[in-house]
Image: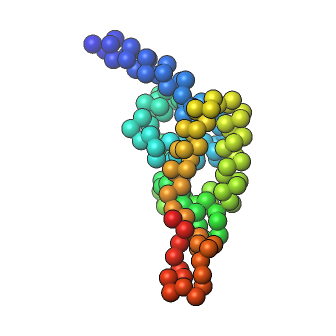
Amino acid sequence: MQAAIDLDFQRAADELRQTWQYRVLKATGKQVYSVLLSVIAHSFDEAMPVLLRVVHPGFTSISAPFYCSAAKIDKAGRIVADLVTRDGLILKDTVVFKSQTEMRDCFRRVADMLKLSDRDRLEFFTALRKWVVADRRLDPTMDARDPDARRLVN
């Protein structure tokens, strides 16, 4: 019975090694890696335990610091997320990227470095877009005379 379970895990591990999720986690540095963990957990939560055991043999659990929330765009246009510190404190709205452009360019470089296929690139950037769940900037088309002048984008 154990041999069948090991064989199933090995088959799943081989399949996971072909995915963009595995490839980006294996290839990125510490700061980008922590963002990607949050991105992948947000879109592929059920696959995370197996994926992390394949990426890191012997994996048991994620250790702090790590991002524990999806991202938001704050009023200044920065990409922010909640961060769990080494001490276990949660820092709300920690700046992850200074702008959408900085985030986009960072992950374009990752996709280019890994030579992701068009399909993988589309899935990768779709997951990144889904990770940014709110935009707190004021609507640039807002009319200040409008009684609803404090409405937000999205």
Q: In the image, is residue 58 above or below residue 154?
A: above
Q: Position of residue 39 (x, y in %)?
A: 52, 46
Q: Nearer the viewer, residue 139 or 9?
A: 139
Q: Position of residue 37 (x, y in %)?
A: 53, 43
Residue 124: quarter of image: top right
Q: Quadrant of the N terminus?
A: top left
Residue 142: quarter of image: bottom right
Q: In the image, is residue 144 above or below residue 93?
A: below
At 38% from the left edge and 38% from the top edge, which residue is drawn? Answer: 46
Q: Nearer the viewer, residue 19 or 151?
A: 151
At 51% from the left edge and 62% from the top edge, which residue is drawn? Answer: 134
At 71% from the left edge and 48% from the top edge, which residue is drawn? Answer: 105
Q: Position of residue 121 (x, y in %)?
A: 61, 36
Q: Nearer the viewer, residue 147 or 106?
A: 147
Q: Could you tell me if residue 64 is visible in this image?
A: no
Image position of 75 (left or right of 88): right
Q: Could you tell me if residue 130 is visible in this image?
A: yes
